Image (cartoon, helix red, strand yellow):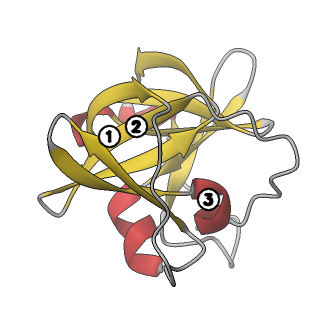
Protein backbone atom coordinates (compact mmCIF):
# COMPACT_ATOMS: atom_id res chain seq x y z
CA UNK A 1 0.00 0.00 0.00
CA UNK A 2 1.23 3.51 -0.75
CA UNK A 3 0.68 6.24 1.83
CA UNK A 4 1.27 9.95 2.06
CA UNK A 5 2.83 11.01 5.36
CA UNK A 6 2.08 14.49 6.66
CA UNK A 7 2.70 16.46 9.81
CA UNK A 8 0.22 18.06 12.20
CA UNK A 9 1.98 19.83 15.04
CA UNK A 10 4.70 17.47 16.24
CA UNK A 11 2.96 14.27 15.09
CA UNK A 12 3.04 12.38 11.80
CA UNK A 13 -0.06 10.93 10.17
CA UNK A 14 -0.69 9.01 7.00
CA UNK A 15 -3.50 8.26 4.59
CA UNK A 16 -3.58 6.00 1.56
CA UNK A 17 -2.53 7.80 -1.61
CA UNK A 18 -5.47 6.24 -3.46
CA UNK A 19 -7.67 8.76 -1.61
CA UNK A 20 -5.46 11.81 -2.35
CA UNK A 21 -6.11 13.65 -5.61
CA UNK A 22 -3.61 16.47 -5.19
CA UNK A 23 -1.44 18.44 -2.80
CA UNK A 24 -1.88 22.20 -3.05
CA UNK A 25 -0.39 25.19 -1.32
CA UNK A 26 -2.67 26.98 1.13
CA UNK A 27 -5.27 29.13 -0.63
CA UNK A 28 -7.69 31.82 0.45
CA UNK A 29 -10.32 30.08 2.53
CA UNK A 30 -13.79 31.63 2.66
CA UNK A 31 -15.35 31.19 6.11
CA UNK A 32 -18.82 29.69 6.32
CA UNK A 33 -21.10 31.27 8.96
CA UNK A 34 -22.43 28.86 11.61
CA UNK A 35 -20.27 25.98 10.30
CA UNK A 36 -18.96 23.44 12.83
CA UNK A 37 -15.47 24.11 14.23
CA UNK A 38 -13.93 21.33 12.15
CA UNK A 39 -14.91 23.07 8.89
CA UNK A 40 -12.47 25.88 8.11
CA UNK A 41 -14.41 27.10 5.09
CA UNK A 42 -14.52 26.79 1.31
CA UNK A 43 -11.96 27.15 -1.47
CA UNK A 44 -12.30 27.49 -5.21
CA UNK A 45 -10.19 24.69 -6.66
CA UNK A 46 -9.96 24.84 -10.44
CA UNK A 47 -13.60 25.94 -10.68
CA UNK A 48 -14.96 23.53 -8.06
CA UNK A 49 -16.06 24.57 -4.58
CA UNK A 50 -14.31 22.38 -1.99
CA UNK A 51 -15.06 22.19 1.74
CA UNK A 52 -11.88 22.50 3.83
CA UNK A 53 -11.62 20.51 7.06
CA UNK A 54 -9.39 21.23 10.04
CA UNK A 55 -7.81 17.95 11.16
CA UNK A 56 -6.59 19.55 14.39
CA UNK A 57 -10.23 19.81 15.49
CA UNK A 58 -11.24 16.43 14.01
CA UNK A 59 -8.38 14.62 15.75
CA UNK A 60 -8.48 16.66 18.97
CA UNK A 61 -4.91 17.91 18.54
CA UNK A 62 -3.74 20.91 20.52
CA UNK A 63 -3.03 23.56 17.90
CA UNK A 64 -0.52 25.90 19.50
CA UNK A 65 2.27 25.17 16.98
CA UNK A 66 0.29 25.32 13.75
CA UNK A 67 2.24 26.10 10.64
CA UNK A 68 -0.15 25.07 7.89
CA UNK A 69 1.42 25.06 4.42
CA UNK A 70 -0.61 22.59 2.38
CA UNK A 71 -4.10 21.39 1.58
CA UNK A 72 -4.56 17.74 0.68
CA UNK A 73 -7.39 17.33 -1.81
CA UNK A 74 -9.00 14.02 -0.93
CA UNK A 75 -11.86 12.04 -2.41
CA UNK A 76 -14.37 10.95 0.22
CA UNK A 77 -17.68 9.35 -0.76
CA UNK A 78 -17.34 10.59 -4.37
CA UNK A 79 -16.79 14.16 -3.16
CA UNK A 80 -13.66 16.31 -3.07
CA UNK A 81 -12.69 17.73 0.30
CA UNK A 82 -9.67 19.69 1.45
CA UNK A 83 -7.69 18.88 4.58
CA UNK A 84 -5.19 21.34 6.03
CA UNK A 85 -1.78 19.91 6.94
CA UNK A 86 1.34 21.56 8.29
CA UNK A 87 3.55 19.89 5.71
CA UNK A 88 3.78 16.83 3.53
CA UNK A 89 6.76 14.72 4.54
CA UNK A 90 6.87 11.95 1.94
CA UNK A 91 5.04 9.34 -0.07
CA UNK A 92 6.12 5.79 0.75
CA UNK A 93 5.26 2.24 -0.20
CA UNK A 94 4.65 0.09 2.87
CA UNK A 95 3.82 -3.55 3.39
CA UNK A 96 0.45 -4.16 5.08
CA UNK A 97 2.31 -6.17 7.73
CA UNK A 98 4.03 -2.94 8.86
CA UNK A 99 0.70 -1.54 10.10
CA UNK A 100 0.35 -2.36 13.79
CA UNK A 101 -3.26 -2.64 14.91
CA UNK A 102 -3.87 -0.32 17.86
CA UNK A 103 -7.36 -1.58 18.70
CA UNK A 104 -5.92 -4.71 20.29
CA UNK A 105 -3.60 -2.76 22.57
CA UNK A 106 -5.90 0.14 23.41
CA UNK A 107 -9.52 -0.32 24.31
CA UNK A 108 -10.27 3.32 23.51
CA UNK A 109 -8.74 3.36 20.01
CA UNK A 110 -10.85 5.41 17.65
CA UNK A 111 -12.47 3.71 14.66
CA UNK A 112 -10.70 6.09 12.26
CA UNK A 113 -7.23 4.94 13.34
CA UNK A 114 -6.22 2.05 11.08
CA UNK A 115 -2.99 1.49 12.98
CA UNK A 116 0.52 2.77 13.50
CA UNK A 117 3.57 2.36 11.30
CA UNK A 118 7.11 2.45 12.65
CA UNK A 119 9.29 4.34 10.22
CA UNK A 120 13.05 4.69 10.69
CA UNK A 121 12.91 7.92 12.72
CA UNK A 122 9.27 8.32 13.76
CA UNK A 123 5.85 6.71 14.19
CA UNK A 124 3.00 7.36 11.77
CA UNK A 125 -0.66 7.10 12.74
CA UNK A 126 -2.54 5.72 9.75
CA UNK A 127 -5.95 7.39 9.35
CA UNK A 128 -9.06 6.08 7.62
CA UNK A 129 -10.30 9.40 6.24
CA UNK A 130 -13.82 8.10 5.55
CA UNK A 131 -14.20 6.95 9.17
CA UNK A 132 -12.72 10.19 10.48
CA UNK A 133 -15.27 12.32 8.65
CA UNK A 134 -18.13 9.96 9.50
CA UNK A 135 -17.20 10.20 13.20
CA UNK A 136 -18.19 13.87 13.17
Which one is nearer the viewer's eye here, 28 or 74?
Answer: 28
Q: Above or below — where is 48 with respect to 107?
A: above
Question: Residue tagged by mark 2?
Answer: 72
| Residue at 50% across, 41% down | 99
Q: Are marks 2 and 1 in contact (CB under 8 Å)?
A: yes
Q: Is residue 54 left or right of residue 64?
A: left
Distance of mark 3 from mark 2, alpha carbons?
A: 25 Å
Q: Picture quarter containing residue 15?
A: top left
Q: Is residue 92 left or right of residue 106?
A: left
Q: Are marks 3 and 2 in contact (CB under 8 Å)?
A: no
The quadrant of the picture occupied by the N terminus is top left
Image disc number at residue 102: 3
Q: Position of residue 118 (x, y in %)?
A: 65, 30
Q: Is residue 83 left or right of residue 2?
A: right
Image disc number at residue 73: 1
Which one is nearer the viewer's eye here, 14 or 60?
Answer: 60
Q: Position of residue 81 (x, y in %)?
A: 31, 53
Amino acid sequence: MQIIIFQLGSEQYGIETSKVQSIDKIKDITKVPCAPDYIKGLINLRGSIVTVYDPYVLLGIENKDRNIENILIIEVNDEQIGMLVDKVIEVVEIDNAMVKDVSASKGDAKSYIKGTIKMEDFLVTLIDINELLNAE
